[in-house]
């Protein structure tokens, strides 16, 4: 006789729905229990993360940036569950032009029209509120980093290390000063490195201007987008293969308006297909002009000054802005009948990445870091480090292959790490201080009384420049590892295990870090590089404040919770690909958490046996669970959370809940089954749920920890290890999955067609290949006449 064994029908999980408000309570519990504390003296292998210090320049973080950092947290959680001792530092990048530009907007001031002390003070105040909100977003997302000791790149300790690395490289002969044509932003009023420049297609006038050939009654037409630089023209060039102009080289052309003769030269840099095929060589319209001036031995004429105004070389256009001069000189050329035509074209224009202003090329005296001689070494490191995804390695290699000049590292800004140099008032030679302090040469006296070069005691002048912000940021692996401060810590943490970052700063943060850390240590800075794609809007366009398509993550986190937010961005796109952001998509991820919660509540009504004699149905779902574990581990080992997020969702929503739980439900209640069969279902429920919770822990840390503590003890789930498959996959049982799914779907469809409920009796047979599941299938579907073969 079959005994009915029904447990107490009362779920241990009392709440009918998962309430995201529980996340804040759990966060406090983690802090109290020191769940994520780091132990430098551990016997475990250490996994150190060179966490990107985010930039609080305006309202911090749109939803795509927040998603990026939530996945960095997934890396940390995954590494802990792989058995590592994880060092997960948190930093805030508070140096450079974005901070200054934000301060100017916020306080309606101009940096160069404000005292340096006052402007620095305003920058610090502007940053503090933004930083507080940014830290709060990190905590709301459940980031398991070190918030008790987070660092700032404008702190005395960080800036002291930046200056120390400069002094160290100076003494190695890797720093030098030179006056060279450089990228210059007239709004930011500073030199820029090539990596600070982006290119945009902008509408531009291509003006066709007639130049008179000296000594003959003939003209040559030049097409130019920079007619305001006529005063700085030193040559015209034509391509030697251009048959139209074979008789022109060695003749002279007269510059319109200025009536100054310049040679016409033959040079392959002229492109016959562009404009008229005649190129005006000015100082400086672009970097091709710079190269041609060097190659042809031309003498530069500086037409634009550091204020973005025309110099005295422009004649009557002196002191006009570039835009004013361009308009006026075109008008004058038209008045004199020298313009053949004007074309509106889209021109690839270099602009300042920060201010979005078109750059000029202005000769400036700056400090340079030697990099050309290190490109081979950096390329070798780039080829050896592990990339996630592998495809993004090529972006770095392409950039390395494009580097053609040394890195100009000094900037004419206020809010940054100061260049630690004083110049003797007598001999003018530079003198550097010793390591060990943070120096402000623009304000402070030098730490020495006499010049080490000439012995003079007449005084010194401090350098007023700061460093390129990437000169600071590029030593983040060294700072977090204790370089020049703690040799024991450095030995344990460096090289760092992983650098997670976005792909748009591969040419800057990633490249400069590899360069600088190699120059200082002779080693790579990290073992792995993890590159996430961009967060874009629903149309696939990158988010920006100017477009008005930015989504603020804070309200989403408050209303929907961190787990929904995290699950959405994990399942949205494979690692390295851009991912579409929308409130609708994020809200949709809450449905999965609701499904998971309902499953947890159902399973929580049953006790968990220590062992059980499993049925074929149980063995089947555990075989599928083993396959799930295997596939999730493949994703986690590559830190590609798209794989586990989607596979878990497919397993839960498409297999475990609709098929296995429904097949085993009657058995779990003891309806027509004996105690052994009943306990087998309970065991399998809990076995699957435990595994699912642990697999989800890196992605949705709050809900799984809550359930784990309620069902499986007070200890946090975040101390568990990622599961392993029980054994070799049971391919035989797995091969039956599609047949089980097809059969169940066919029964449900037939009942639907007949207009009866899913609980109704139906005349249908279990197919022969599913006979081992027959008892569960009959109970699930209320089948009769099951001995008849189903076709």
Image (cartoon, rainbow, N blue to C red):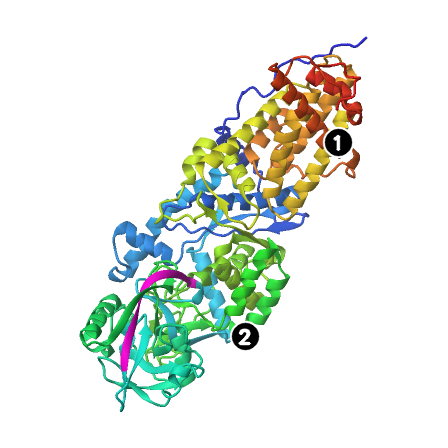
Q: Position of residue 651 (x, y in %)?
A: 65, 33
User: Residue at horizontal 44%, vertical 72%?
Assistant: 368
| Magenta highlight range | 196-211
Task: Compare marks 2 and 1 and give the one earlier in the sequence.
Answer: 2
Residue that label 1 marks: 736
Q: Secondary structure at mark 2?
A: helix
201 part of magenta stretch:
yes
Residue 24 among magenta residues: no
Against 676, residue 569 (above or below) is below
Tell which residue pokes out farthest to the right in this image. 1
Residue beneath label 2, please? 373
Task: Identify the residue at horizontal 50%, vertical 37% (top origin).
Answer: 565
User: 754 and 524: which one is in front?
Assistant: 754
Q: On the rendered image, what quadrant is the C terminus found in?
A: top right
Q: Nearer the viewer, residue 497 or 17?
A: 17
Taking the image as drawn, is residue 734 in sight?
A: yes
Q: Quadrant of residue 97?
A: bottom left
Q: Residue 65: x and y, percent?
A: 46, 46
Position of residue 173 relative to residue 390, above or below, is below
Q: Which mark is residue 702?
A: none
Left or right of 245: which side holds 227? left
Coordinates of residue 85 in the picture (x, y in percent): 63, 46
**Quarter location, residue 253:** bottom left
SS majority, magenta: strand
Q: Is residue 674 above or below residue 60?
A: above
Instruction: Name the front one of labels 2 and 1.
Output: 1
């Amino acid at each position: 006789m079959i005994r009915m064994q029904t447990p107490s029908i009362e779920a241990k999980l009392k709440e009918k729905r998962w309430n995201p408000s529980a996340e804040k309570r759990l966060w406090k519990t983690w802090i109290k229990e020191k769940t994520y504390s780091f132990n430098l003296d551990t016997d475990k292998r250490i996994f150190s993360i060179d966490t990107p210090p985010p930039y609080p320049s305006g309202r911090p973080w749109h939803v795509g940036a927040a998603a990026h950092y939530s996945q960095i947290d997934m890396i940390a959680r995954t590494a802990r569950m792989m058995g590592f001792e994880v060092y997960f530092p948190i930093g805030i990048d508070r140096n450079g032009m974005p901070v200054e530009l934000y301060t100017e907007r916020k306080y309606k001031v101009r940096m160069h029209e404000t005292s340096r002390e006052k402007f620095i003070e305003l920058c610090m105040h502007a940053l503090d509120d933004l930083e507080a909100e940014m830290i709060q977003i990190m905590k709301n997302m459940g980031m398991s980093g070190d918030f008790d000791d987070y660092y700032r790149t404008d702190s005395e300790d960080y800036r002291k290390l930046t200056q120390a690395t400069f002094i160290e490289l100076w003494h190695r002969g890797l720093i030098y000063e030179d006056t060279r044509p450089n990228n210059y932003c007239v709004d930011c009023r500073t030199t820029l490195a090539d990596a600070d420049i982006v290119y945009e297609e902008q509408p531009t006038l291509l003006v066709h201007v007639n130049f008179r050939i000296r000594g003959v009654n003939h003209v040559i037409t030049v097409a130019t987008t920079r007619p305001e630089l006529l005063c700085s023209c030193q040559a015209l060039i034509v391509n030697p293969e251009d048959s139209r102009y074979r008789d022109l080289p060695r003749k002279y052309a007269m510059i319109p308006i200025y009536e100054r003769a310049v040679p016409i030269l033959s040079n392959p840099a002229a492109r016959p297909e562009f404009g008229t095929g005649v190129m005006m060589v000015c100082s400086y319209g672009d970097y091709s002009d710079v190269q041609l001036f060097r190659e042809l031995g031309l003498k530069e004429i500086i037409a634009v000054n550091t204020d973005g105004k025309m110099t005295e070389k422009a004649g009557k256009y002196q002191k006009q802005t570039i835009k004013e001069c361009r308009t006026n000189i075109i008008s004058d050329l038209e008045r004199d009948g020298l313009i053949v035509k004007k074309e509106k074209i889209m021109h690839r224009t270099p602009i300042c990445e920060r201010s979005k202003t078109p750059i000029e090329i202005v000769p400036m005296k700056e400090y340079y870091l030697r990099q050309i001689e290190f490109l081979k070494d950096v390329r070798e490191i780039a080829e050896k480090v592990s990339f996630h995804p592998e495809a993004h390695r090529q972006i770095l290699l392409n950039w390395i292959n494009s580097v053609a000049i040394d890195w100009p590292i000094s900037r004419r800004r206020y809010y940054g790490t100061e260049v630690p140099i004083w110049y003797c008032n007598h001999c003018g030679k530079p003198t550097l201080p010793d390591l060990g302090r943070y120096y402000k040469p623009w304000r402070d006296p030098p730490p020495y009384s006499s010049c080490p070069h000439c012995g003079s005691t007449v005084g010194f002048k401090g350098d007023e420049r700061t460093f390129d912000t990437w000169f600071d940021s590029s030593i983040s692996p060294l700072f977090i590892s204790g370089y020049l401060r703690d040799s024991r810590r450095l030995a344990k943490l460096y090289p760092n295990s992983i650098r997670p970052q976005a792909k748009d700063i591969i040419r800057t943060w990633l490249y400069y870090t590899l360069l600088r850390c190699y120059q200082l240590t002779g080693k790579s800075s990290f073992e792995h590089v993890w590159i996430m794609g961009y967060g874009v809007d629903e149309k696939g366009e990158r988010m920006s404040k100017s477009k008005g398509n930015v989504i603020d993550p804070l309200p989403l986190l408050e209303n929907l919770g961190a787990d929904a937010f995290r699950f959405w961005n994990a399942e949205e796109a494979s690692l390295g690909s851009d991912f579409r952001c929308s409130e609708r998509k994020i809200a949709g991820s809450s449905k999965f958490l609701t499904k998971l919660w309902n499953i947890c509540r159902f399973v929580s009504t049953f006790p968990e046996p220590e062992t059980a004699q499993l049925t074929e149905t149980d063995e089947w779902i555990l075989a599928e669970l083993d396959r799930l574990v295997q596939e999730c581990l493949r994703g986690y080992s590559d830190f590609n959370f798209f794989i586990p997020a989607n596979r878990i969702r497919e397993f839960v929503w498409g297999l475990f809940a609709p098929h296995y739980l429904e097949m085993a439900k009657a058995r779990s209640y003891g309806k027509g089954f004996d105690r052994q069969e009943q306990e087998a279902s309970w065991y399998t429920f809990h076995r699957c749920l435990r595994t699912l919770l642990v697999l989800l822990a890196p992605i949705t840390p709050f809900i799984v920890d809550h359930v784990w503590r309620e069902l499986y003890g007070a200890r946090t789930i975040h101390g568990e290890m990622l599961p392993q498959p029980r054994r070799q996959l049971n391919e035989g049982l797995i091969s039956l999955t599609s047949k089980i799914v097809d059969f169940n779907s066919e029964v449900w469809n037939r009942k639907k067609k007949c207009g009866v409920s899913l609980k109704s009796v139906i005349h249908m047979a279990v197919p022969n290949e599913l006979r081992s599941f027959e008892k569960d299938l009959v109970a699930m579907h209320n089948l009769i006449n099951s001995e008849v073969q189903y076709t």
